[in-house]
Each structure stands twice: as structure tokens, then as C-alpha cells.
Amino acid sequence: MPLRLPPLPSLRQFEAAARHKSFTRAAEELGQTASAVSHAIDSLETWLGASLFSRTARGVVLTSAGQYFLPYVSEGLSTIALGTRRLPGRRTERHLVISATSTFAQRFLIPKLPLFRKRHPGIRLTIDTANRQMLFPLDGADMSVRYGAGVWPDARSELLFRERLIPVASPEYLASVTKGGSVDWSAVTFLRLTSVEHDWNAWIDASGTRVTIGDELCFDTVHLVCEAAAMGLGMALGRLPIVSSELDSGRLKAAAGQPVETDAGYWVVSPLGQEMRTAARVFREWLLEEVRDDTGAGTRRASLPTSDARAYLKT
């Protein structure tokens, strides 16, 4: 007797809506309209003969039936996705999807990709910088690179490097605020990352430098902060090794002595309890090998509030 299954596309829409607690955000993830997701859920509820969501002014909430149904749907979709990825002889088995924060992808990964491509020309890559938590294997990513303390649910995390903070500025700007061989901090315009409120304070505390923050400019991405510093707009708190290329090229110059290491860092995150495909293992090993050349020792330690680390995931 054939299995009696509900419409399969609607199950994907149900899972996304339940995870986001929003038809609109589910639609954005799936590349559909909120109306299409809503209609699909309505059809699924009609087919099941049960209400899955309660609609509220703030979004949607799973009913008791929806809460009961969700684990079965999530497990079923995960099994199908995993089986598809492991299908023997599939032409896309050497195609990797890597999810990464935009900062890491733009300022660390992409400059190094020519080395990977030269060493492994047969592996095709897709780099996804969407700002969302990866749910393996539903989101189609083999692994992700995330910033934080290294703890994510149902995932294995391996540390690439901890972030190290050091004030940086263009050589011309640094010269303009230096007197008698020392930085005149009262003359400095501080360039801030809006999603991280306490980074300058953490560096000041850990370095023991006497600094009173006065004039400042704020930006919402690490890239803009670095560009503003390179253009002579002020002094930024450089994040090593993310800012290493600017220091090597001379666009930016370190304004103080030793870097300060934070508690947070960049991690390779992969599915827990799932065997990694050969191509994914090759990429992971290459990435771990590359970061060994970009990390240093002998740094002081600073603690950033957890809320700052979470906010920085968006950059």
C-alpha cells in the first residue's frame, strides 16, 4: 500500500516557518512570497485536518499539534537532504557549499582562494554569506565559518583563530596625532564598529593605555571601519589577522605595541555526528593549514561581553 503523504513542498515551508516563527522570514529564506508560504500552510493544515500555527500580531506560534509534528518533519527533511548529498556517483559530490560571515569571506577567505583552487582544481565552491544560523543539512552547506565563543547547537566547532585587537591608522594620520614619539590620544578620532560597543574599552583595559575617547565616527561593518582608517578619517581597532593585508601593504600602520587577544574567535562549524565528505575534509584541512601562518603569540587577553560577540556575527 503506498504511503499517504502530505504535499512535500508544504513540509519545507512549514519547517522554515516554524523555525523562524514568521511566514515572511521563511519566504525570504525560500525565495518565495509570504503569501505563497501562508497559502501552503493553509493547504497543509486542511490536508492534515489540524491547525499548526496560531497567527498573532507579532508573527506565528506553533500550536500543540504543530509542536508535535515539527520534529518528524525536520528529521524527515534532514534524512532526505543527507541521502541526496551522499548519493554515490552524483555529479555534484565535488561541489562544496561554505557558509561564512561576510567579514571572514571578504577579508580572509577570498584572498586565499587562488591557493586552494590551484591545489584542488577539481573542487567547485559556493560561498554563502547569508546572515543566518546554518541548520545542517537542510541549508545545503557542508560547513560554516562563524564568529563567537565556539558553542552552537548540534554542531562540531574547531577554532581557526581568536581575534586580536590593535589600534591602526594610515601612516599619514598616525604621524599627525603623534607627539614626541607617542600617540596623543586626545587628538584621535576613534572609528567604531556599531555592532560591538565595548571593543575599544576592552583594548584600553587590557593594554593598560590611558585613553579618553572623545571624537568618534561609527560604521556598521568591519570593512568600512578599515577603509575609513586607510583614508585618514581616524584610528580604528584593527582585528588580526583580518586586517593583516592592510598592514603588510602599508595602507595601515599599527599605532601601539602588542595586540590584545579576545575570548571570541572564528570557528569551522560542521554537522555533529555526520561523516564529512572527502572534498569537505580537504577544504577544512587546507583552511586550518592556512590560518597557522596568520596567527601570533605573546598577546594580552581581553574579554568582550557575550552580547558583543553575538552582534558581531552580523558583520
Image: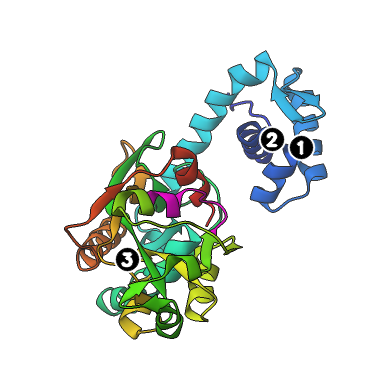
| Position of residue 18 measured from the top left corner of the image (x, y, whole percent) | 64, 31
Which residue position is annotated with label 3?
241
Scheme by which the image is coloured: rainbow
Secondary structure beneath label 3: loop
Which residue position is annotated with label 2?
7
Looking at the image, is mark 1 or mark 2 nearer the viewer? 1
Residue 105, placed above or below residue 155: below
| Position of residue 191 measured from the top left corner of the image (x, y, whole percent) | 52, 65
Is 196 within the magenta? yes
The magenta stretch is: 193-202
Kindly give the residue lying farthest to the left in the view shown: 298
Q: Nearer the viewer, residue 14 or 255?
A: 255
| Position of residue 251 measured from the top left corner of the image (x, y, whole percent) | 40, 83
For the residues marked 3 and 2, what is the alpha-carbon distance in whole angstroms?
48 Å
Which residue position is annotated with label 1?
40
For the residues marked 1 and 3, what is the alpha-carbon distance in whole angstroms?
46 Å
Looking at the image, is mark 3 or mark 2 nearer the viewer? 3
The residue at the point 71 percent across, 36 percent down is: 22
Kindly give the residue lying farthest to the front in the view shown: 180
Is 58 within the magenta? no
Q: Nearer the viewer, residue 125 or 298?
A: 298
The residue at the point 43 percent across, 80 percent down is: 170
| Position of residue 295 measured from the top left corner of the image (x, y, whole percent) | 23, 63
Q: Nearer the viewer, residue 25 or 264?
A: 264
Mark 1: amino acid: Ala
Q: Earlier in the sequence, mark 1 or mark 3?
A: 1
Residue 176, placed above or below residue 193: below
